[in-house]
Image (cartoon, rainbow, N blue to C red):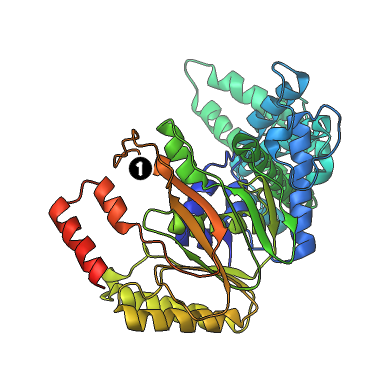
Amino acid sequence: MILKDYINQNPGFRYVVEQLELLSGVSRQQLLSAEFCSDHEALQRQWDELELMLNAIGENADNQPIADGCCCDEMPKRSENTAGNQTLTDLGHALMQVRDITTTFINCQRSVTLDDVQLFEIKNFAMLNNQIAKQVAALGVEQLAPLPDLSEVVALLDPDRSGVPHFYIYDSYHPQLPSIRKELRALQSKAELQPAEEQCIAELWQQNAAIEDEVRRKLSSQLSGYAGIMLEAMHNIGRLDLLLAKSKLALRYHLCKPQISSDMRFEGLLNLRLDDILSAKESRCQPVDIAFGKGVCVITGANMAGKTVLLKSVGIALLMAQFGFYVPVRQAFVAPVQDVMLCLGDEQDEMNGLSSFASEMLKINEILKRAKSGRLLVLIDEPARTTNPVEGMAIVDAIVQHLNAQDSFTLVTTHYSGLQSDCKRLRVKGLRQDLDKDVRITPKNINNYIDYSLVEDVAGDVPQEALRIAEILDFDSEVLASARELLKKS
């Protein structure tokens, strides 16, 4: 699958991608068509390239590369008004002027006679390419996006060496053009023309047009030999822009370079979308540590314990890593997979006439089929929660047993206690038990008193905090009292 497919399926990952500050007209298409990468060497190469760009734009004081697992907030911040900053500014301005003219280059390759607009596009691109190449060399990252010297292309399209990025059939392209155009100007300047002079103007225009057409054919033929080089240059400019955008994103959010591992481990994992929302409210998202290997890890916790957000955050982090991004953690160890598959409670198919349970079963069935033949990251949020508890727990147990035998990494959240499957179990700590009596919890501040960290949970019992949370939310006191009595009897 390509990145476009994943952002259509995953709003959280789409939010991350939307934060990229892409400048050129060629990088966005490259980004959307990027392949989900599971090759270890290719991933390491992408992360290393991003590291080189980060070192260049971050002006690392000791000129040492960022160590594996190092967060961008450990890098020295750029100083103001430096030559490096000016180079970045100039590079940004040049990238913003680069348009995707693939069709023009393809026509050029095929020796199609180009019109003046297409010749202008090529001239402008060649000049921008040479400008960007100098700026990239000044940053010391020319190996990330090798750009050719297109001075010969510029010379073909700017014979008078004006240095201006527009195109015109200059007089110097043909020895007869100066005299023809001079005579035309002289005749056209007359207030009144004789019939013979009007006929002369028409003939001169025909001669001028014929010569201009000849010049375009000749230029198109000469440029066809450079078309392949220019296509490659445009591709590398797109790569450069994408690397620059990923680097700026990494600096903005203090992202971390992942490391290849046989297991999954995220230390200080954040959800960028949620953290931005909370930051706007002068709050912060609590970082969470999570580690799991092949097989199934079951996560329990009370309502509002952040289990669904945790699953989304893990999925987003791995998607970021396997599309060549740094990730929102203090440290990340990832085992590359072939796909990330989710079944979350907020992705129902009522519009297709399916119940939430039917929709969920179809999605999980697809996951089970895929897991038989490939290594996946599987994220399932509270399966079978909408059916009766007895059958629901049996279904969850069976799903866990089946996926536990596959070559995939699976996280399953549940409210069911007493699962029989042999698997790793974690529990969200949940609502703090050591709250001061004077603390007044309200629906607006309750999240401040929930501990979202994970602990090992051998027993696998789900915390019973529903009544306590309902009370905090000012639920009807009589109903709560009745519920407590019924709970005692059960």
Q: Secondary structure at mark 1?
A: helix
Looking at the image, which residue is at 30% across and 52% down? 468
Residue, disc 1: 446
Comparing 269 with 102, the one in front is 269
- Indicate the position of residue 202 as horizontal and vertical percent values: 55, 35
Which x, y percent locates residue 158? 75, 31
91 lies left or right of 440 = right
Q: Is residue 293 left or right of residue 316?
A: right
Q: Is residue 97 visible?
A: no
State the residue at coordinates (26%, 52%). 470
Identify the image quadrant of residue 303. bottom left
Q: Residue furthest left?
A: 478
What residue sits 33% from the left and 82% below the top?
A: 390
Give the camera-side residue of 106 and 205: 106
Q: Locate the N terminus and report the quarter of the image it occupies.
A: bottom right
Could you tell me which quadrant the C terminus lies in?
bottom left
Residue 448 in sight from this viewpoint: yes
Q: Position of residue 17 (x, y in %)?
A: 54, 48
**Amino acid type of disc 1?**
Ile
Q: Pick the residue in front: 369 or 267.
A: 267
Q: Quadrant of residue 132?
A: top right
Q: Is residue 400 left or right of residue 154?
A: left
The image position of residue 25, as x and y in percent, is 59, 43
Horizontally, residue 315 falls left or right of residue 393, namely: right
